[in-house]
Image (cartoon, helix red, strand yellow):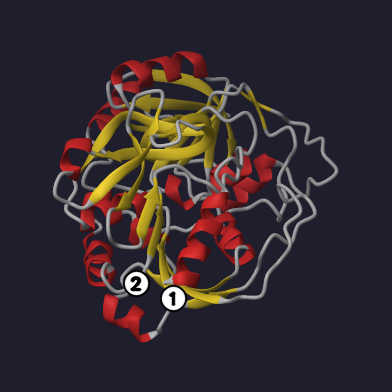
Amino acid sequence: MRARLVLQDGTVYVGRSFGAEGTTDGEVVFNTSMTGYQEILTDPSYCGQIVTMTYPHIGNYGVNREDIESARPNVAGFVVREYSKLSSNFRSEQSLNDYLRNAGIIGIEEVDTRALTRKIRITGAMPGLITTTDESDAELRAKAASLPGMGGQNLVPKVTCKKSYEWRAGMESVFSPHPVKKTNAIVKVVVIDCGAKQSILRWLVESGCDLTVVPAGTTAEEILAMNPHGVFLSNGPGDPAVVHDVIAAVKGLLERKPIFGICLGHQILSLALGAETFKLKFGHRGGNQPVQDVKTKHIGITAQNHGFAVRPESLEGTGLRVTEINLNDRTIEGVEHEELPVFAVQYHPEAGPGPHDATHLFARFTEMLRVA
């Protein structure tokens, strides 16, 4: 079926649909990972976004139940150059087309994703829509022009859990990144769920954490009543500056519990200490971002997915110091407090998909809790 992708600036890309039919809208972004489309689709951090894959062939190894990062796809839509009709992998349980159709996610193929990515890099990420309807281009351009940007959107309520739960699963698949020896849970950790990936929870368990996952609206007092050894701030979607309830909770926890944050959690921790965030032109999304430790000068290759960053000049007076920077654009990739037992990174050490250069950070958090 004919489908169209319409950007807010009026650009129209014509292609063919796969997955569900209808109309969807969101911020149009691109991801440079060559594999891992299933993990990307199910990452809650992509809520509200239409994801474009720069790698040209997508769907060739199908979908399975082991590699998901949440219970359902969270993207608003999916854009690829060529959807592979053949799923050729012994782990495949379902085609990508059927998976998206059953989840109600609209995909479009036969789009010049090189041209689309170039446009986003030049003009910046912008809202857009995908449709399989027969509306005119003029009607669709008018709709796209009125779509809101990502700035000011609090999408965390859409992806956080509805009630608290215990998480005990570690790396149970034989296809885990490498063999991990499980340890008995020795530290209690409360995870504030802003859209947590399952890979993060699994790495925390493997590192010796007994996890209780709580909704994003949980207060500092409620968390302290659980008497955890530490608190983890998860990844998530949207503008971090408007996630006011989580920022308030972190303020109430700062001098009372050790804290580790990833991605949105990194931004929220920084905001709670008085820093500011800003929207990146087109963000960092992919599995090949170089990050440098400012002290050791060691360089790691990281997986990333974010459209906002912490403003460097706003760190003055917060007690935070920069620990890592992105070598592509010099944005902040890690911070730690000069006195308090809190640290955070902008990238994803758990990857899923991507390199595992930074998985040692989970052990660092566990050791911090053991001595706290």
Which of the two labelled residues, at mark 2 and mark 1, occupies the earlier sequence position?
Answer: 1
Direction bottom: furthest residue? 225
Q: Depth check: 313 or 136 in front?
A: 313
Q: Is residue 58 left or right of residue 178?
A: left
Say which amino acid is labelled 1: His
**Residue 291, horizontal then vertical, whole percent:** 45, 32
Q: Do the residues labelled 2 and 1 touch (CB within 8 Å)?
A: yes
Q: In this view, does 89 lie to the left or right of 150?
A: right
Which label was assigned to residue 229?
1
Residue to which mark 2 is pinned: 257
Q: How crowded is mark 1: few (under 14 residues within 10 Å), some or many (20 or more)?
A: many
Q: Can residue 154 be seen in this view?
A: no
Which quadrant of the view contains residue 53? top right
Question: Please, what secondary structure does the residue beneath circle 2 have?
Answer: loop
Q: Name above or below for residue 343 compared with residue 210.
A: above
Q: Is residue 260 left or right of residue 187?
A: left
**Residue 172, horizontal then vertical, whole percent:** 74, 62
Which label was assigned to residue 117?
none
Say which amino acid is labelled 2: Lys
**Residue at mark 2 to residue at mark 1: CA–CA distance:** 7 Å
Q: Can residue 249 be seen in this view?
A: yes
